[in-house]
Amino acid sequence: MLNIRIEKTTTPKVLPKADNPLKFGTIFTDHMFVMNYETGRGWHDARIVPYQPISLEPSAMVFHYGQEMFEGLKAYKAEDGRILLFRPDKNIERANKTNRRICIPEIPEEDFLQALKAVVKMDETWIPDKPGTSLYIRPFVIATDPFLGVRPADTYMFLIILSPVGAYYPEGLNPVRIWIEDEYVRAVKGGIGEAKTGGNYVASLKSQVKAHDEGYSQVLWLDGVERKYIEEVGAMNIFFKINGTVITPKLNGSILPSVTRDSVINLCKYWHLPVEERRISIDEIYEAHKNGTLEEVFGTGTAAVISPVGQLRWEEHIMKVKDGDIGEFSQKFYDTITGIQLGKIEDKFNWTAEVK
Ligand code: PLP
Ligand code: COI
């Protein structure tokens, strides 16, 4: 159990007004959690302090070689006033998987959960309660040694910051337009694609800018070897409903094992809806669109929740899905997952964890 030192802010910020749209990732709460690591000493000095800039040497290793892990999860204010986290155990497990992949020391699971709960509790008044809003939680670790050689660091900082958010996409639950990238790739098997680390996101920027310039919200990646099989979208995994079956790419080492993806697969099984995790080629999607069996497309992610896709662009082909409307199943997954998150629907899967 961590012994968390607490230093409360003496200058609390004004909470966002009720009509603030809470543009994703722009507002930060009053406090943050911090803990340090040093080889030989382990994780130590756990504290909750006022949200503030951190001071690092310009030579800090994270700036040069990108040794950093991040996670994303949310806290919700339930109708009965409880504070709920959604499947924090999955984020903690994935954080340590990322840590192992990029040689960051693991964080004991129970300490991680304690830190999450403590900092959320500290800033609980910041959890918004309008429909579609939540408190986004961003835990991350950075390598801090002042050193320019390439090796795993000996010192790290683990921080958790909090941000009240609305929808990730300006479209909200309206379908987004997605650009299928056929030039650049995000990740390859054996690389770091399945880890949640900054390198994957910087690799995506050039394509994202191109897609935005063309009026598309995000990029859908194809596999890095044959540029043929569907991988995932910039900030979410992807699902297709073809001829009554829900299909999503199999976890193959180069895509992020998403918590929301796993939740959708579990719901399909619970509802006895045929669901397949397998390789899907872009040709298969194109064919399904042509013959009218591509019924729905949606993305899944913590920030994006369930995000219906209304249009896919692949080379010169534009594939409209559901005439740009939200599909029945996308809506059902959205309603069920957000219902569980908000404590409105019975949590049969034991997915929520209460912050007391
Ligand atoms: N894929 C990528 C690349 C992501 O950044 C995210 C966001 O976390 C996801 C998928 C969705 O994962 P999760 O549902 O765990 O948030
Ligand atoms: C999340 O959904 O939590 C993410 O990390 C997406 C992020 C890249 C905005």
Image (cartoon, grey):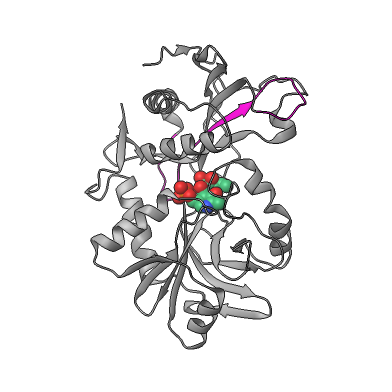
Q: Position of residue 262 (x, y in %)?
A: 37, 53
Lateral position of residue 201 relative to residue 1, left or right: right
Q: Is residue 60 left or right of residue 301?
A: right
Image-based side of 153 in relation to 148, left or right: left
* Residue drawn 70% across the image and 59% down it: 207
Instruction: Count the labels in the image.
Output: 0
Which contiguous range is marked in magenta? 127-151
From the top left corner, tell me how far across and down residue 37 is, in percent.
Answer: 55, 18
Is any atom of residue 135 visible in this view? no
Magenta stretch: includes residue 25:
no
* Most common SS among magenta residues: loop
Q: Residue at x 61, y 34 (%)?
A: 68
Q: Nearer the viewer, residue 208 or 17?
A: 208
Q: Of 146 and 235, which appears nearest the observer? A: 146
- Which residue is depicted at the point 43% across and 66% down? 278
Magenta segment includes 141? yes
Is residue 169 shown left or right of residue 65?
left
What quarter of the picture does the C terminus occupy?
A: top left
Residues 87 and 82: in front is: 87
Seen at 71% across and 68% down, the residue is 214
Residue 232 position (above or below residue 21): below
In the displayed structure, would residue 235 be above or below residue 285?
A: above
Percent position of residue 38, x then y: 58, 15
Quadrant of the image occupied by residue 229: bottom right
